[in-house]
Amino acid sequence: MTAYIVRRLFATLPVMAVVAIFVFFLIRFAPGDPAAIIAGEDATAEAIAQVRMKLGLDRPVLEQFAIWSLQLLQGDLGISIFSNLPVTRLIAQRLEPTLALTLSTLFVAVALAVPIGVVAAWKARKLVDRLVMGFAVLGFAMPVFVLAYILIYFFAVQWRLLPVQGYAPIGEGFWPFVESLILPSVALGVTYMALIARITRASMLEVLAQDYIRTANSKGLATDRVLLLHALKNAAVPIVTVIGIGIALLISGVVITETVFNIPGLGRLTVDAVLKRDYPVVQGLILVFAGAKVLVNLVIDISYAFLDPRIRY
Amino acid sequence: MSGAPGPILEVRDLHTQFSTLDGVVRAVDGVSFDVARGETLGIVGESGCGKSVTAMSILRLIPRETGRIASGSIKFEGEELTSLSEEEMKRLRGHRISMIFQEPMTSLNPVLTVGTQIAENVVRHLGVSWKQGRERAFEMLDLVRIADSRRRLDEYPHQLSGGMRQRVMIAMALSCDPQVLIADEPTTALDVTIQAQILDLMIELKEKTGTAIVLITHDLGVVAETTERVVVMYAGRKVEQAPVEALFEEPLHPYTRGLMRAIPRLDVEADAAGTRPRLQEIPGLVPILTQPIVGCAFAPRCSFATDRCRNERPPLVDAGAGHLVACWEVDRVRRAA
Amino acid sequence: MAVTAEDLAPDIRRFSLWTAVRRNPTIAIGAVLLAALLVIAIFAPWIATSDPLKIAPVNRLRPPSERWWFGTDQFGRDVFSRTVYGARISLIVGLSVAVISSVLGLALGLACGYFRRVDGVVMRVMDGLMAIPSILLAIALITLSRPGLGIVIVAIVIPEVPRIVRVVRSVVLSIRSQPYIESAIAGGTKNWKLLTRHILPNTLAPLIVQSTYVCASAMLIEASLSFLGAGVPPEVPSWGNIIAQGRNFFQIAPWIVLIPGGFLAVTVLAVNLLGDGLRDRLDPRLARRL
Amino acid sequence: MFKRILAGALALAVPFAAGQALAQEKVLKAVMHADVRVIDPIWTTQTIANIHGMLVYDTLFGNDAQMRPQPQMVGKYEISPDKLTYTFTLRDNLKFGDGSPVTTKDVIASLKRWGAKDGVGQRLMSYVDKMEAVDDKTFRMVLTKPYGMVLESLGKTNSSVAVIMREQEAKTDPQTQVKEAVGSGPFNFAKDQWVPGSKAVYVKNPHYVPRPGNESASSFAGTKYAGVDRIELVWISDSQTAMSALINGEIDFVEAPQIDFLPMLEKARGVKLMKTGNLDSTVGMIRLNHLHPPFNNPKARQALYHLINQEDFLRAIVGNPEYYKVCHGLLTCGSPLANDGGSAMLKDYNPKKALQLLKEAGYNGEPIVVLQATDHNTITPATQVLVQAMREAGINVDAQAMDWGTVVTRRAKKDPPAQGGWNIFVTTTGGVGSSNPVLHTWLGAACDKGLFGWPCDAKIEELRNAYAFAQTDEEKKKIATELQTRALEQVVYIPFGQWTVPLAYRADRLEGIVPNTGLAVLWNIKKK
């Protein structure tokens, strides 16, 4: 197993390399002279030239790439054009809220959607199932931001149950922390839940039609044992796969959710950096998000081995 | 356990139906039979004749969203199964009536160990601890003659051969000493030598435990070797019933005769899919079960058919010595023999 | 179960519209909704009650009424007319992204599945692209250029292509390993003939299904981009823009957000339903998986 | 890479823990109109940088609400009879946030840097012969001419305030941002807790010495002190969210609530609105690029006057007439110098005439590049109204959408519009600055040295100079009228009205807010 994990880790390297190359050249093709942006509002031509030299922008592209890659390997993502702070620091500052939001959403969505999907499959074609499927189809079509505003309007503005905006670090107490995450997690999680509930139902339906479930029923096993052990364990691989695919969805959703709920996480940093054309920050963020996604895929792949004894490495 | 005499299982006028987009399918259309204690009863017929549905109906395993037992009675030890609650039914399944299936490849759960799958049955019904359950599983594996049984307990189905898996299925089904074992095509998917071994094993265990067996098959060869009494089904109806010797000596229904002619010889090789050729040699098509069938269901394919056959449903009549047949033209058939 | 309708009644089904709808209600609902939206989009100039760009500050933030069916926004523009025109943008983005990414994905997928040498390089690049979350990639691409409908489409296409390539490639690989294709290759059948006769037709069903999902997700991404301020120029009445500009007034003028939001949701829903229905019909294998 | 980020995250957790330990401290959570991104108020003209600056730094003088300069850091001062020599002595014991004393070296370096960068400062410096330190606390400013606005300039209360930095920062090239924000103002900038794009944190400066005597605070004048232990400028870009957060009690203060929400804020329990001063706080301007065709021709510039119906703009931006005013002049309406010199041209709204005049001026349908901000409360709708009006008139508009920060960058480009330059952008400026011909830098026409758009007219500059030396109010008024007439003819910019936005705050928690038009100040606010 360890050997497999190591091998898979190495296999992610080319992917990350492609991302890095892409990110580097993406920014090189950007319109406007980064040096001019850095130099400021009414910088002279000389000042711009000076900045360009300082940043090494006057050197050949390949040399720039080599320097940039070397810095990258040392964990140096450069300096933000606008705030003059190291990109790593900006990202580190924003990591906690985003991690908290995605993890809580992941947790809540999986904890709710999987049972919902199981029940829907169990009660296939009954009212419960139709409600669940209706929710799944709608949830998948609902734009996150529209849902978010509706949630804010009722839960925060009308009924004053939860905060309108913001993020309370866990260091400021557990309840404020949880409170600040509820609405964003729901808004962010609905699409994700719809996806997971749907795949759980489909996957369970397929499994429930299998001969071994008939066997389990012929043994007179209790319903929960049949559903949750015999069926769900077999349905787990596609469910886990979709949970993994959905992480990408979450990351995209985080960008919007954090904007709506004013959460100082990586998503808002992304929007700000992109709109301000703060290229080093954009580069760093793409790398971090891509890294996260690759890592998640890795974890998912490895989890298969625990879920299905037929998979061998 | 009531020691009352009489059949352990009585099926009376069973109707099982499925609703589909094309209408209601009458999969079992008024079937009755008894199973005596310790007896081996064969149910034969082509695929789609309703024999599997009959078996599933007894255990009430018909999928609720599409199918239901429309009418009829199933009595187990004098107790009416159709009126039991689902919970009571669950207590019965795998415990007093158990079942094994056609596909040993797919009938075992691929993600649970063999030991778990046997032990959970024992734990569920006999109220023993998991440790004792595992011990019982180990005994059962020994009983069905799986070598190295201790180690096998912790293996997954994909690590076993087809024959071994069917042995595991049998071990599982018998683990709670059931009164009735329903075996739905238990050997069809296996190759010939294994088939014989499994059948021998079943008979041997039956002798040992006194379990009655309902053996469902399309294979008259298997019926001849294994069973004591035979029910022949066609299009959801019982068309003939007889002690096994009587049936093979003088089949009275034209359909049974057709089946006899189509018996695959044991030396015929199984095809690529692992199954031997089925009984498609009788000309014509199985009737459409969504349409009400007027008259004899076999009439369209029957060389003896008359207008009466096509218009009036033949009743089951006793042709002597417990040999029942539903055919207007029994006499002609007899003469044709 | 042993008995199914298919086994028992193989050849008595007669075609009728009603049975088709009953058998596959999702396709029907999706298609009807989508057709309605297409009509709205095509005939927008006749349906709209006023110029969607016309600013009338005197009439700002009016609630829905007889004169302004969907109310007005903060510039006094008619939300109904803007929503109607917005259907154009959404459908143009959805359809063109679906078509362009399908064509590109098909070409690349066929090449990858068929030519081993191409496969290595292209799939590495695709893996890299897929590692970047699509919205992130799209906004990054858009900032490289001036905002416009074209660049938005391109920016959404690029992250969608790898998904299609994967689907097509896997189909090609599975067909290629079929004995009859292998023998055809051994027998010297021309590449293009193999592609067009055997491989292409088999890829179409999953491709069509996949492209409906791409279409739906493209419309959502377009709206999200506009919402984030990185989409089509702000004066263009796309649903995302209408919502983005109205979001600040949600508490006093919720119609600016809810109505186009509803239209967007219904459109995406329609496309998804159509996709589900098509999938059930064209690709039962996939249907069981998802 | 991840290791580093992880380490950073851990490092970050420490201040969180610290924040909890000090839970008893009084914290003011305020949402300003923008996010603190640049910490050098001299380098940028952004108002938010100056709000930041006024928390951290102090000034020599501060103008009061009547725009009269009052000493702030200065203890006493003398003006020679010929009005050429000013001698300033600093108050005792003034210290920077790091504990080091404020000396005349710091003061002179800071004034030099300010004088090199800020328009008002540049003008002042053009009359300064020398600044010399007498000792650590006293310095002398010697002028070449008896310039009349020395103290007003030093005490200016709108953008690019003449703040005093440490010498080490003040020596930074004015074109480069300072790296640290250490001043002698009431608060210290907690740079380690600064999350650009989210919040900026200020803690009470233990070394700050307020003016003695408890002088009542008025605008930048009077006794200033830190009323709370900690100020968090939380950035909420969505004005509706900011409003809801205020009503919900998540924050205490909103500098610029959207006017559409004022009725809701008025109704909200615990929330109060407050007018920031006597003048309208904001003036809207459409700025044309005088360097490139067609607007290098005054006729073409004037043509646009006929496109502008101020009501349209004000309705779109403000909505409620209670908070806006049409103003056909360049000096803030309602201020002493407001006049109608040249106003007639602005009152003739006639889009057809506009196009015709434009064509007469040589316009042939080339695309006019408008920098269109997409994320600004007022500038975004104003630009949209303008673009729409231009399109309706038949002008070929190339509206380039970008965020306000990018507009700020782009507008500095002198390249032709086709090569990354521009023709038109819309902006706003403070009503206080705009009421004075000299402080109103957008009124200037100093060619290359002027502000973006680079109007170039010697007569305008002459008149602004003359104003600075005018002795009587009558003379001032006369010059102001002449100046406005000339500036409107030259079209230094096109005004589209003025408005005021009250600030909103939790009256159940805060008291002692000092009103100041144009640039919110947060000193003296106490938390109950």
Image: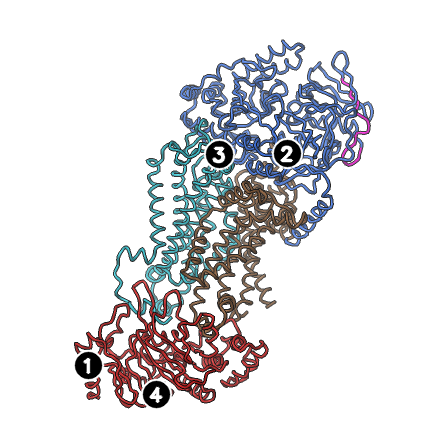
Chain colours: A brown, B red, C cyan, D blue
Find residue A6 and name its label. none
Find residue D400 and name its label. 3
Find residue B304 and name its label. 1
Secondary element at image label 2: strand
Q: Which residues are magenta?
A: D86-100
Q: Name the kind of residue labelled 2 in the image.
A: Arg
Of residues A53 and D372, the one drawn nearer to the viewer in this rendering: D372
Magenta stretch encompasses residue C88: no
- What distance separates the C-alpha of mark 1 from that of mark 3? 90 Å
B125 sits to left or right of C64: right
- What distance separates the C-alpha of mark 2 from that of mark 3? 39 Å
Q: Name the kind of residue labelled 4 in the image.
A: Ala
Q: Which residue is mark 2?
A: D506
> Within 10 Å of the Cα at label 3, are there few (<14), some (14-19), or many (20+) other Cα atoms?
some
For the question of whether residue A259 can be seen, the reply is no
Q: Which residue is mark 4?
A: B224
Q: Marks 3 and 2: in contact by CB < 8 Å?
A: no
Residue C65 place in picture, x, y as percent: 40, 33
Q: Dot 4 falls on which chain?
A: B
